[in-house]
Image (cartoon, rainbow, N blue to C red):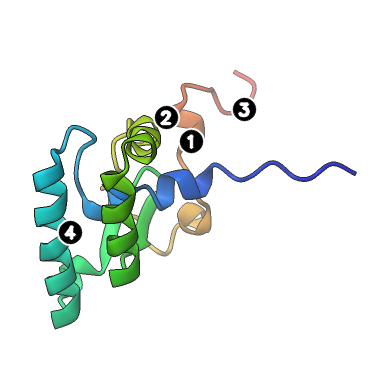
């Protein structure tokens, strides 16, 4: 038996740039500043700091995730990997919970990738 390939989803949903809400072009100083700001906001329990956008929808932000993101972006090789995976823009469109696709990881993937649905 061969081992299953690792899922690419964590590389997007847990990407340090998405966790921090920064573009891949952010400087080290911007990373540190935003990380400290988010940690303070999370400590205060502010709702706007508790969620972040990824290409696969929103994810929950924790203080541990912010610290891990900051640490990852301090290492040049790790930062480069995160830069590669952070090329997709975060999906900021609201998703009503009543739609059938709301529970799927990337419900509009077919349209975004340019694939046609159905037979024609």
Please give the name of the residue rendered at 16% of the width and 49% of the height, measured from the top-left corner. 31
Q: Residue at coordinates 26% horizontally, 54% vertically from top-left?
A: 70
Q: Earlier in the sequence, mark 1 or mark 3?
A: 1
Number of other residues with Cα within 10 Å of mark 3, as a class: few under 14, some 14 to 19, many 20 or more:
few
Q: Please state which of the two labelled residues, at mark 1 or mark 3, is closer to the viewer.
A: 1
Which residue is at the far top? 120
- Mark 2 and 1 residues: CB-CB less than 8 Å, in contact? yes
* Numbered disc 2: secondary structure: helix
Report how far apart the C-alphas of labels 2 and 1 lie in the structure: 5 Å
Q: Secondary structure at mark 4?
A: helix
In the image, which is nearer the foreground, mark 4 or mark 2?
4
How far apart marks 4 and 2 lie (CA) works out to 31 Å
State the separation of the CA atoms marked 3 and 4.
44 Å
Q: Marks 4 and 2: CB-CB under 8 Å?
A: no
The mark lying in front, picked from 3 and 4, is: 4
Residue 106 visible (yes or no): no
Q: Which residue is mark 1?
A: 109
Q: Secondary structure at mark 1?
A: helix
The residue that label 4 is drawn on is: 35
Is the residue marked by circle 2 packed among few (<14), some (14-19), or many (20+) residues within 10 Å? few
**Above or below, comparing residue 38 to residue 79 in the picture:** below
Mark 4 or 1: the one toward you: 4
**Earlier-in-chain disc, 3 versus 4:** 4
């Amino acid at each position: 038996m061969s081992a299953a390939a690792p899922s690419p989803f964590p590389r997007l949903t847990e990407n340090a740039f998405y966790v921090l809400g920064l573009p891949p072009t952010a400087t080290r100083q911007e990373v540190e500043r935003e990380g400290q700001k988010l940690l303070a906001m999370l400590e205060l329990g502010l709702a706007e700091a508790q969620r972040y956008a990824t290409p696969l929808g929103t994810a929950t932000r924790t203080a541990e995730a912010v610290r891990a993101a900051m640490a990852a972006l301090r290492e040049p090789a790790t930062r480069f990997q995160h830069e590669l995976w952070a090329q997709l823009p975060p999906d900021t469109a609201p998703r009503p919970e009543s739609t059938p696709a709301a529970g799927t990881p990337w419900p509009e993937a077919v349209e975004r990738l340019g694939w046609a649905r159905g037979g024609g």
